């Protein structure tokens, strides 16, 4: 059984379709990276899975249509980190991570000892334990991104949707964050779907790529199948070379056009 199955999904804002006839399946514990140029419909597709953007077609999680779930059931099943999350400055790291426990609480209920234990464990795994009582406004960019991930992981959902999780991070912090997501995916068995602008990072972390352009699927498959020079030049209007590291990992390198 696939963990996530999109069947002919059309994400739309009213009558305006932003992702059209998208079909893709992700195996349990897999990592799908949705890539494409600006405005391709990547973020909107993730929002359709979350349920904050209208869609046609079927979205199934472990064989169950997400449309059949209540809002609370859906929130328990799918954890989502938007590209520009709202980070209330005065909240501490612990308080912010506890927001991930909201789907597990009854209305107006306060967090339980179990919820505090879950958050404490998550913060330790993300090396945020020493920052637990720090206000979000005092954190560095990398620390804030880890705090966002802490809220997502505290939700204890089987499907993690991360919209551009490395935005604003330097290469070292970006690698550290994606390494952490990959380790948690392998250890916990969670299924990961990300949008990523960095094609090299997409190739090196995701097992499966979905390339969108103008809201339509133009390629999908392994990184080697999708990240061809022709695909990138055609859909990104970019001049590139496809290189490989000494370990065989794909590198998409910009290549400056040579003057005639």
Image (spheres, rainbow, N blue to C red):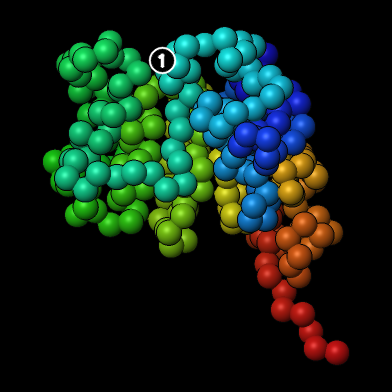
Q: Which of the 4 image quarters holds residue 68?
A: top right
Q: Determine the secondary structure under disc 1.
A: helix
- The quadrant of the rendering that contains the N terminus is top right
Residue marked by disc 1: 72
- Residue toward you, 6 or 203: 6
Q: Position of residue 135 (x, y in %)?
A: 17, 47
Establish if 96 lies above or below 85: above
At 33% across and 33% down in the image, what residue appears?
151
- The quadrant of the rendering that contains the C terminus is bottom right
At 68% across and 19% down in the image, what residue appears?
58
- Residue toward you, 71 or 181: 71
At 74% across and 49% down in the image, what residue appears?
213
Establish if 12 lies above or below 35: above
Q: Position of residue 252 (x, y in %)?
A: 68, 61
Q: Position of residue 153 (x, y in %)?
A: 38, 30
Establish if 109 lies above or below 86: above
Left or right, 98 with reference to 253 = left
At 33% across and 27% down in the image, what residue appears?
100
Q: Kindly tell me whether residue 199 is visible in this rendering.
A: no
Question: Local crowd at mark 1 within 10 Å, few (<14), some, or many (≥20)?
Answer: few
Q: Kindly tell me whether residue 254 is visible in this rendering.
A: yes
Q: Position of residue 67 (x, y in %)?
A: 58, 15
Left or right, 48 with reference to 226 = left
């Amino acid at each position: 059984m696939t963990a996530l199955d999109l069947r002919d999904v059309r994400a739309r804002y009213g009558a305006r379709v932003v992702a059209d006839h998208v079909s893709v399946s992700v195996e349990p514990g897999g990592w799908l990276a949705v890539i494409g140029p600006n405005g391709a419909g990547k973020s909107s597709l993730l929002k359709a899975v979350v349920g904050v953007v209208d869609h046609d077609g079927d979205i199934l999680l472990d064989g169950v249509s997400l449309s059949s779930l209540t809002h609370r059931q859906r929130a328990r099943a799918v954890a989502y980190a938007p590209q520009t999350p709202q980070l209330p400055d005065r909240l501490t790291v612990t308080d912010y991570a506890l927001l991930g426990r909201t789907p597990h609480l009854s209305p107006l209920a306060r967090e339980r000892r179990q919820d505090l234990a879950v958050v404490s464990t998550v913060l330790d795994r993300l090396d945020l334990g020493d920052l637990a009582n720090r206000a979000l406004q005092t954190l560095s960019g990398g620390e804030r991104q880890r705090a966002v991930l802490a809220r997502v992981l505290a939700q204890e959902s089987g499907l993690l949707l991360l919209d551009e999780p490395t935005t604003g991070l330097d290469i070292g912090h970006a690698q550290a964050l994606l390494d952490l997501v990959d380790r948690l995916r392998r250890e916990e068995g969670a299924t990961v779907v990300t949008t990523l602008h960095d094609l090299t990072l997409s190739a090196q972390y995701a097992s499966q790529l979905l390339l969108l352009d103008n809201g339509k699927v133009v390629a999908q498959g392994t990184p080697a199948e999708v990240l061809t020079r022709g695909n990138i030049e055609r859909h990104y209007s970019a001049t590139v070379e496809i290189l490989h590291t000494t370990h065989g990992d794909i590198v998409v390198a910009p290549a400056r056009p040579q003057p005639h």
